[in-house]
Amino acid sequence: MKKRIVIIAEKRQDKLHSVTLECMEAATKISSDGEIVVLLVGDDDDESIADDLMYYHCDRVVFMKNSKLSRPNVHTLLPLIKQFIEAEQPYAVLLGQTDFGKTLAACLSESLKLPLVSNIVEIKTGPDSLFVTRQILSGNIINKVQINNHCILSIKQKAWKADNRLEEKKGIKEIQSPIVNNPDFSLVRLEKKSSGKEELANANIIAAAGRGVGNESGYLLVKQLAETLGGKVGVSRGAVELGVCDASNQIGQTGETVAPKIYIACGISGAIQHLVGITSADIIIAINKDEEAPIFQASDYGIVGNVFDVLPLLEKGLRSQDSQ
């Protein structure tokens, strides 16, 4: 399907958000030979991001640059992006299903009078239509939608891979210098949360604790396993409710969506609210004393046993390998 696609790039902590690269990969499923355009909004410090984007699957990188756009908000961006989309007339506009992306997508949908389909996990094309699959009602229902006209699509994080960097530049860079009015409000500063949220989104290995860890000692066993493997520790809502940890590294419907190479679920039963956050993991390993736990249905490997028995044995085995 030869269509022009516009992707709205997003930054996180002054770096390109990985969901932008995932949107670029999703765009190739919509338009195999059409034009893919990435819009990046920022200031002079973001030019390196624009340069790097040219090494991915896009034909044009449009860098909208102004000193007032260093930390833009939706209120400031909306008129600029609306004008850009109206000029480009794309078949589809893609954004990430992030807090920022969801807000901007809804505002664009209303302003441009275009339909919005959110939380998309799969895209297929027909002769004159798009067929998208999305998760609704906390992932309990898979909804399939046929799209026959121009639209805005919000892509679920980690539903597509973001490791599609090319060896040579593919796209070209265009710089625009829009006139930006003084915003009604602006971000003064950012402060890192004192508790230190685990950066799970890009972790290759995650060991996660569930209600089955029982107490703080069980949680510390899981945390030690993660450290031994050089990974990150995560938790389910059940572990948070136990009071053994806070929700800063929670995974699932009300937490992070992750896509590690290896995910080790320790004492996690496998409720759907948790599973929706780990569906993109390459390998899932479950440890649970209940052999009927739903987590085993979603796992590649399973160990039936108590975490207090299994994890010390795993630690011993890993440390003996390191010493050899």
Image: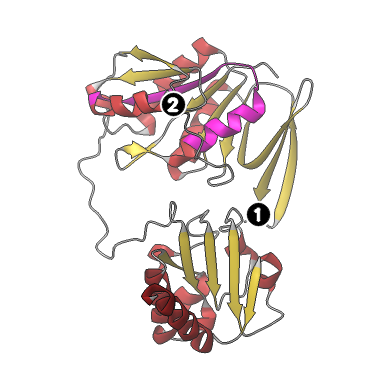
Q: CA distance from mark 1 to mark 2?
A: 37 Å
The quarter of the image holding the N terminus is top right
Residue 247 seen from this side: yes
- Is residue 189 depicted above or below 308 in this figure? above
The correct choice, above or below, for 184 with respect to 192 in the image is above
Q: Is residue 263 above or below residue 303?
A: above
The residue that label 1 is drawn on is 137
Q: Amino acid at mark 1?
A: Leu
What range is drawn magenta here?
Answer: 21-44
Left or right: 2 in relation to 8? right
Give percent across and percent down for residue 276.
Answer: 60, 58
Residue identified by numbered label 2: 55
Q: Give the amino acid at mark 2.
A: Tyr
Residue count near mark 2 (Cα–Cα under 10 Å), binned few <14, some 14–19, many ≥20? some
Q: Position of residue 198 (x, y in %)?
A: 36, 61
Residue in the foreground of this view, choosing between 130 and 24: 24
Q: Secondary structure at mark 2?
A: loop
